[in-house]
Amino acid sequence: MNQFLWIFMSVMAMSSCSGPEKETSVKDESSAVPAQTVAETASSNYLSGITEANKGSKTGIVHIQGSVRGAHTGQTMYLFETEGKNQLAIDSVKFTNDRFDFPKRSMQSGFYRLALNSDLNSIDFIVSTVEKDLDFSFANSRIATGWTVTGSPENTAWNVYQKEEALAIRTIDNLRKSRSGSAFKERIDKEIEAKEQELVSTHHTYMKNNPGTFLAKYLTWKNPEFPNDKGKYWNDIDFNDESVIRTPIISDRVQSYMIAFSGGMDSGFYNCIDLTKEAADENSAVLEFTLYIMLDGFYQSGKETICLYILDNYIFDEDCGANLTDVIKQRAEGIINLQVGKSPPNFTIRDIKGDRYDLYKEVKKGEYTLVMFWASWCHKCEQEIPVLKNLYSTYKPKGFQVVGVSVDQADAAWRNASEEKGINFPNVSQLSGWKSPVAQDYKVTQTPTLFLLDSEGKIVLKPKRIFEVERFLQENL
C-alpha cells in the first residue's frame, strides 16, 4: 500500500501478479452509475470507545525490552513506527544473549512494529504511553508465532484480538470465493453478513473490555458512524488527533469512501477528494498524510489523471499547498518522476553474474531500454518472458535493451527461475521482495510492471503487455 493497493481501482488484477494484498476488478467507467448519497441516522454498528483518557495523540516516555528464546548475542531487533500501512525504522539494538533492550524514549500513541533481523519477521504492537514499561517474551525466533508482554494489558488484548480478526476475515474471504459460480449465492450472502456482524460484535466487546485505551479508539474508527452518508462520512474522525496517522484507518476509510460515493467516474473521484481534503484540513500533519494516501492509491491503481488533480489542486497549488511541508512535495515528486516524459530513479544493482548494473549508464548505450519487474512465482511473467526474449533478440541489433528486475526474496528461487526461463537479458535483484528499495522507488506492487526508457533515461511508455512494446519498436526503430 508498501506498500498499499486499492480494491476498487485494481483493473490489472486479472492480468498481473500482485503484492501482499490481492485486488478485484471494477466496472468500466463508461458503465458506472453515479453513487447516490443516502442521509441516515447513526449506524447500529457504530459504538464510540473514545473518552478523555484516549482522546487525541498522547506522548510519553516508554521503555521497550524483551527476550527471544533461541536468540543469541549479535542479532538485531528493529523498532519501526507505523505510518498508515507503511513502517519507518526508528531504532535498532543488538541482543545480549537472548535479550534486547531499547533505551527509554519519548513516543507518541499508535501502532509500532518490532522486527527480528529483518522487517519480514515482525509483530505489530500498541504504544499507549500509559503503559510505560513493555517487556516482550517471544517463544522462538519466528516472533509472530507466539508472544506475550508483561506490563501491558492493552497489548495482551490486542494480541488476542488480532487472531480473532484474522480468523473472521479469512472465513469471510473464503465465503466470498465460494460464492462465485455457486447455486446458493443468497444463502452465502447471509452467511457473509452474519460473519461481518460477528466481527463488529467482536469490536464492541474489546472496546467495552478495554475502556479508555488506544485499542478502543482504533476499533471505534473501524465502523463509521454514517457509512452511507457522503456528507457525514468523516464526522466520527477527529482529524486533529495525529495518532490516526499511526494506524491504517485513513487508508481503509478513503478506500471505502471512494467505493461508496465516487460512482467509478473521474468527476465522482474529484468530488470525494475535495470532501476528504476539506475534512482533513483541521490539522496540517493529518492533511498531508491523507493527501498522500489518496495520491499514492490512485497512482497504484493506474489513475494518473486523478493523481494530477491532487498534485495540481492541493500539493503544488500556490494557495492550497502553501502550508504543506517539503516532505510531501518530495514524496509527490517521486510519483511525478514515474510518469511518461519524466526520468525515473536510477539504480545500481548487482546482476545474476555478480556484475554491477547501472541503469543510467546502460540506457545511454541503446535507443530504448525496457525495465521489467518480474518474479519467479508470477504466472503472467512466465507467459510474457518468452515473448520478450524473442523481441529482445530481434531488436537488440537496432538498439533495444532490456533489464529484468526480480522482486524475489530467495536467491535460489530467482536463479532457478532465470535459468528455467532462459532469460537472455541483464537480470538483477535486491532479494528483498516488494520492500526492496528499487521496487519502492518505482512503486511496484504487481508483476509484471514495465517501463520503457529512451536513451536519455526518460519514460516514453508504461505498457501493460509486451505486445505494446513490440508495436512501439516497430514504429520507432
Image (tube, rainbow, N blue to C red):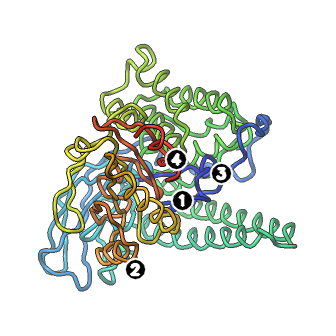
Asked whether the beta carbons under mark 1 and mark 3 sit within 8 Å of each other, the answer is no
Q: Earlier in the sequence, mark 4 or mark 1?
A: 1
Image coords of residue 383 (percent x, y): 52, 66
Which residue, given by chain and number where applicable, does mark 2 sit on?
146
Nearer the observer: mark 4 or 1; the answer is 4
Distance between the alpha carbons at the discs numbered 1 and 2: 34 Å
Residue appearing at x 37%, y 25% in the figure: 324
Q: Earlier in the sequence, mark 3 or mark 4?
A: 3
Q: Amino acid at mark 2?
A: Gly
Distance between the alpha carbons at the discs numbered 1 and 3: 39 Å
Distance between the alpha carbons at the discs numbered 2 and 3: 31 Å
Q: Earlier in the sequence, mark 4 or mark 2?
A: 2
Q: Nearer the viewer, residue 340 or 190?
A: 340
Circle 2 packing at 10 Å, graded few (<14), some (14-19), many (20+), is: few
Height in image: 258 above or below 70? above
Nearer the observer: mark 4 or 2; the answer is 4
Which residue, given by chain and number where applicable, does mark 3 sit on?
47
Image coords of residue 382 (percent x, y): 48, 68
Q: Nearer the viewer, residue 138 or 454?
A: 454
Lateral position of residue 41 relative to residue 107, left or right: right
Which residue, given by chain and number where applicable, does mark 4 sit on?
468
Distance between the alpha carbons at the discs numbered 4 and 1: 15 Å
Q: Amino acid at mark 4?
A: Glu
Residue appearing at x 19%, y 71% in the figure: 100
Which residue, given by chain and number where applicable, does mark 1 sit on?
16
Q: Earlier in the sequence, mark 1 or mark 2?
A: 1
Height in image: 256 above or below 277? below
Image coords of residue 107 (percent x, y): 29, 49
Nearer the observer: mark 3 or 4; the answer is 4
Q: Nearer the viewer, residue 263 or 384?
A: 384
Helix or strand or loop: what does disc 2 sit on? loop
Q: Amino acid at mark 3?
A: Leu
